[in-house]
Image (cartoon, rainbow, N blue to C red):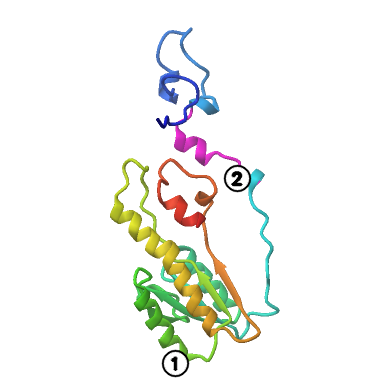
Amino acid sequence: MFTPPHDGSKKRRTPLDALSGSPKQRSSFPPTRLEQPAIARWCSYDWTRRSLVCSSLPMDSLNGKVAVVTGASSGIGHAITESLLAKGAKVFGLCRHIGKIPKAAIPISCDLRQPARIAHAFEILQQAVPSIDILVNNAGIAYLSSLLEGKVADWDEMWEVNVRGLAVCSQEALRMMAPEGGRIVNVSSLSGHRVPPTGGFYAPTKFA
């Protein structure tokens, strides 16, 4: 029988527990690491200690390069698109909300949950340029829940976008890269290496 891991006590103490009870029963405050809620321990983890060392593969110059960024309409994808544009790259933004991408980027409507839509987006791309140099697999979705509370439909959608969508985009991009090659950048998450309490199924999709 599977027994969930615990810190050795019958009941996990919280900061509020530390303030209750008699002086002899009270624990130290602020709480020790084991007394903190699981999400607090995850957030306070020293990520730099065990972070992977990633080697960079810089191109000589981004000026004139053709880049494709998925999820370019918001967040990290929007910022990456702006940065590539600032360095002189021609950027195509693949996303569902094409009206939100940086103005200098070229929008292509795409839903990564549907492989056929991805293939169609790259067909449009082929009509615009003969080849591409960079693909940034940035698009991703997250439904935060524990394994006990998660919904199968949410898990399926995260897998479709975060894993299968990334793989299909990479396949299509490789077919369009020039013989001398290019760069594929996958934007992941620290959740893929250390699972947060609410990352029941999101974390595996970022580790895959």
Pointer 2 residue: 47
Residue type (three-letter) at the residue carrying disc 2: Trp
Quarter the N terminus occupies: top left
Q: Is residue 207 above or below residue 150?
A: below
Q: Is residue 122 above or below residue 12?
A: below
Q: Of marks 2 and 1, which one's residue comes earlier in the chain?
A: 2
* Residue 203 placement (x, y as % from top left): 46, 50
Q: Residue at x 46, y 34 (%)?
A: 38
Magenta part of the chain? 36-48
Q: Residue furthest front?
A: 1
Q: Helix, strand or loop at disc 1? A: helix
Q: Is residue 99 above or below residue 51?
A: below
Q: Residue at x 51, y 67 (%)?
A: 79
Rounded to the nearest angstrom, the CA distance separating label 2 from label 1 is 44 Å
Q: Which mark is residue 76?
A: none
Q: Helix, strand or loop at disc 2? A: helix
Q: Residue at x 33, y 40 (%)?
A: 148
Pointer 1 residue: 127
Residue type (three-letter) at the residue carrying disc 1: Gln
Closer mark to the observer between disc 2 and disc 1: 1
Is 129 left or right of 74, judged from the image as shown?
right
* Residue 170 placement (x, y as % from top left): 50, 73
